Image (spheres, rainbow, N blue to C red):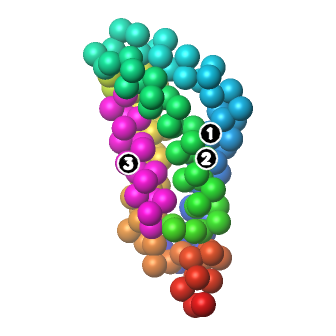
Amino acid sequence: MNNIAFLLARLAIAGSMFGHGLVRLPKLQTFSEGMVADFKDAALPISLVSAFSYIIPIAEFVIGLLLLLGLFTRVALIAGGILMLFLIMGTSAIENWGALPSQLIHVAFFAVLLNHVQSNYLAVDNLLNKG
């Protein structure tokens, strides 16, 4: 993967994650209540769902911001992949099969980018490594 391709893919996944977090943060309580309602019949403790529902938007925002900046890129890619794996498990628990393709695409982006992180371009990481 060349540097420009990596940059475009990094910015695309960053925009998705950052955007998801950005729009959810101002309505965190409403987002959490909606998730708890969605999981009311799932075989997961509601306290776990509630706690995770507050973590998701913050994690999305931070991961997206780090990837937009190209800061701690490798760690952000791993964190994004792990977050998506948790979301996939939750999506499966409530049989929300319509959300699954988007989550799988996100995981694929994280995995491919992680595999080619040496192509990171226009990133704060590069400035820090040269300083």
* Front one among 3 and 122: 122
At a point 51% along the width and 37% down the height, the residue shown is: 56
Residues marked 3 and 2 touching at CB (< 8 Å): no
Dot 3 corresponds to which residue?
82
In this rendering, does residue 95 appear at all?
no
Dot 1 corresponds to which residue?
20
Say whether residue 95 is left or right of residue 131. left
Other residues around mark 3 within 10 Å, as few (<14) / some (14–19) / many (≥20): some
Magenta span contains residue 80: yes
Other residues around mark 1 within 10 Å, as few (<14) / some (14–19) / many (≥20): some
For mark 2, give the secondary structure: helix
Indicate which label's residue lies in the foreground, 2 or 1.
2
Amino acid on which disc 2 is placed: Phe
Dot 2 corresponds to which residue?
61
Amino acid on which disc 3 is placed: Ile
Picture layout, residue 90 above or below residue 4: above
